[in-house]
Image (cartoon, rainbow, N blue to C red):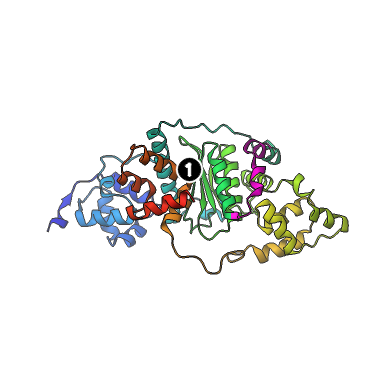
Amino acid sequence: MADNIHIEVNCKVLVWARESLALNRNLAAEKTGISAKRLTQLEEGEKQITLDELKEFSKAYKRTIATLLLKEPPKEKPLPIDRRTIDSKDLGNFHEKSIMAIRKALALSQSYIELKHELGIEISKFNFLASINDQPQLVAIKLRQFLNLDELREIKNINYALEAYIEKIESLGIAVFQLSLTQDKLRGFSVTDGTIPIIGIKRGGETATAKIFTLFHELGHIILNEGGLCDLSEKSTIEIEKWCNAFSGEVIIPSAEILRMNIVQEQKQAGNKIWRLKDLAVLGNYFHAGPLAILRCLLENKLTTSAFYNEKHLAWNKPSFGRAKVPEGRNLAKEAIQEKGKTYISLAFSAFDQNRIDLKDLSDFLGIKFSYIPKTRQLLNA
């Protein structure tokens, strides 16, 4: 009987909770099992909600019951601008999983700020800025020098290289998170209107080289102070996307440097514009890039043909190309570090070690159960 008692809620909060997940009333009715007619009555304040219904809304909208009982709808940041290469009718329409990933990034950034405050660490202001009228290649050269990216050449393991690039970018005062972006063809996003800029990159289903390209593409957005949700398509006609792609490509594969490589010089002298995968792989290992990215750079420098590039793009730009055929089992401690980054995880452990937060707080900041905390620390220090 207690579950059927009626509860007074602000109907505007119900509408806000539904719309924040980009659900229309019909979809919300499907997810909650509450009829569209009843849903309309609740949202228009004609009827009062029951506890059972409140629980259904909480589950469907991914909001706590306490949030749904607020007196007024809370203010939340809007989603970043949709910069995907899709039909105009799909622009701005996102799967709830994508919205939840962005929500999570925003929440993690607030936790990141809170941890720094707990430790008395000043929030660095990002000040490496440029204009879209600037040449992306020149901005890329400046960034490489500023972050001393050449020192990362010594890293042979591509996964360690990805971690090192993330730490370099975090040193600029940016929070970087790897999140589950399984829908909407999203590879990454960036947020520039908060206390600290945020970069989100796709965690699963991507090679480390692809993640590195996405990482610097999104950094390009932050440098231009124009965040967005991106698919990084080469076909994009959006000027800012083209700028960020060019910027990322030049950061990872500096044109002047690749043109000096012996393999490239030999191919150029022979007038050979057809490239072996073996040679592209050698170049890719040096530059921490995939063979397709290397080939794209060679195309831009007129060292291969459009026909050859398009042929290989069709063959290699597939979900299975360059992936492990037997994925490893879940490792929650590893996932926590990968998702939140070593900088965030280190801050959480530092706050705990200095008695600024307790064990439960640490578990909450890390997003893992108590039993996984020792393993997480072990992996962090490995």
Residue 286's spot in the image, x, y percent?
69, 53
- Circle 1 sits on which residue? 343
Can residue 43 be seen by looking at this rendering?
yes
Viewer-closest of 316 and 243: 316
Residue 193's spot in the image, x, y percent?
48, 36
The prevailing secondary structure element of the residues shown in magenta is helix
Viewer-closest of 150 and 313: 150
Q: Which residues are magenta?
A: 142-158
Name which quarter of the figure residue 206 lies in.
bottom right
Q: Is residue 303 left or right of residue 314?
A: right
Viewer-closest of 136 and 49: 136
Q: Is residue 303 left or right of residue 140?
A: right
Name which quarter of the figure residue 371 lies in.
bottom left
Can residue 99 be seen by looking at this rendering?
no
Q: Residues within 10 Å of mark 1 (few under 14, many from 20)?
A: some
Name which quarter of the figure residue 69 lies in.
top left
Give the residue displayed 35% in from the left and 51% down from the top: 18
Q: Residue 148 in magenta?
A: yes
Viewer-closest of 333 and 90: 333
